Structure formats: structure tokens, C-alpha cells
Amino acid sequence: MQQLLFYFDLVGVFVFAVSGALAAVRKGMDVFGIVVVSLMPAVGGGTLRDLVLGEPVFWVQNTASIWAALAASALTFFVAGKLESRMKWLIWADAAGLALFCVVGAEKALAVSGSPMIAVMLGVATGVAGGIIRDIICNEIPLVLRDDQEIYATAAFVGAGLYCTIMYIAAVPVYALWAGMAAAFITRAAAIRLGWRLPKALY
């Protein structure tokens, strides 16, 4: 189980780092800027989660996450010019990272706090905080805050919530992890494809 979580975390770091590197390439940044921006979504959400929980920051304990992010930024640096639509790739890499991180974040928060409510909140924070930092550095309105944006943070809430629900009912961690991740990604993917949005207040 711990090994599966470790791999989930590494994959999440990698795909979120790709999203950051693509955002930097779109802004015309040099290689240093690409590396810096790629690290923001890769480690930002997990860092926030660990600090709130009073736990050692994950990438300080094990630098494998940093190496995964650096590998993602290097790969993106060399192949980004061949991609037809960098924004499209960014959105889908971000969706994959969101799905992975919201569940990994919820798992760690539940294990430390024992509270499903805190686990869901920090699962969502783990999924969205890094992307917010990435977009602010790139002088963009964060995806989660855009008026024209499809369902985003709600997808993380669905994934983290389903994970905690399965753990509460059946306490089967492997099924909970896969189900939560799949639910978050499917929700986000459907929102991207179908343009789902939450209702707004009437003025």
C-alpha cells in the first residue's frame, strides 16, 4: 500500500510538473523559468498539506519527487515545440495531477488527523494549491478561479470525498485510492469535454 502511494505521488508530481513547464513555455520563459514553474504545481499543494498537518515536508524527506519534477521539466523543454496545442496538453496534464494529488492528499490527511472532513479539505488543497501558484507566477488567473472555467476544484472534492467514504464504509485502501482517483479524473474530464460548470448567483 505504501509503495502504491509512493508511485501515485511520483506520477502526480511528474504530470503536474509537466503542466507547470508547459505554462512556462507558453509564456516564453527560459530553461530556468521552466524548471522553477514546473516545481510549483509539483510540490506546492503537498507542501501546504504537510505544513498544515505539522508533518515533515514530503520532498525534504525524499528527494525523488524533486528528481521526477526535474525530469518532467527537461522532457517538456525538448518536446514542447512539437506539440500543436500546449494549452490543451496543459489542461489534461493538470487534470491527471489533480486526480492523483487530491486522493494522495486525502489519504495522508486522514491517516494523520483521523478526520474525514479535514482529509477532504486537505485533499482538495493538495490538488489545487500548486496549480494556483503556477498560474499566479505566469500572470494568469488561476484555473480554479476563472469565470469561464469548467468544474475544477469540485472534481478534487469528488475524488477526495469518495476516497474517505469508501474508507469509512469498507476501509479498503487500494480500492478507495483507485476509485477516488478515477472519480476525480472522470469528473474533470467530463467537465472539460462537456463544458460542465457550477451555477452562479443571480444578480
Image: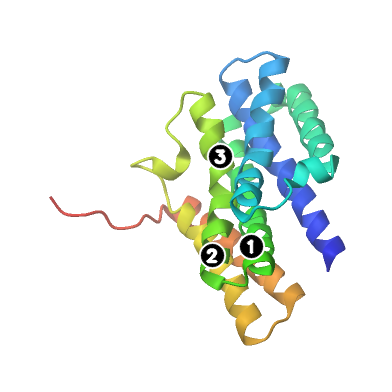
**What residue would you read off at disc 1?**
109
Q: Secondary structure at mark 1?
A: helix
| Nearest to the observer: residue 17 or residue 109 | 109
- The amino acid pointed to by label 1 is Ala
Q: Nearer the viewer, residue 166 or 95?
A: 166
Above or below, comparing residue 45 to residue 172 in the picture: above
Q: Is residue 129 left or right of residue 5?
A: left
Which residue type carries mark 2? Ile
> Disc 1 to disc 3, how far (Cα)?
20 Å
Q: Are marks 1 and 2 in contact (CB under 8 Å)?
A: yes
- On the question of residue 89 being in view, the answer is yes
Mark 2 nearby-residue class (10 Å; few <14, some 14–19, many ≥20): some
Q: CA distance from mark 1 to mark 2?
A: 7 Å
Which residue lies under the disc numbered 2? 118
Query: In the orientation shown, which residue stands out farthest toward the front?
Result: 54
Measuring from the top left, give residue 151's x and y in whole percent. 44, 54
| Horizontal side, residue 201 vs residue 76: left or right | left
Looking at the figure, which quarter contains the N terminus? bottom right
Q: Amino acid at mark 3?
A: Gly
Residue beneath label 3, please? 131
Is disc 1 in contact with disc 3, using a CB cutoff of under 8 Å?
no
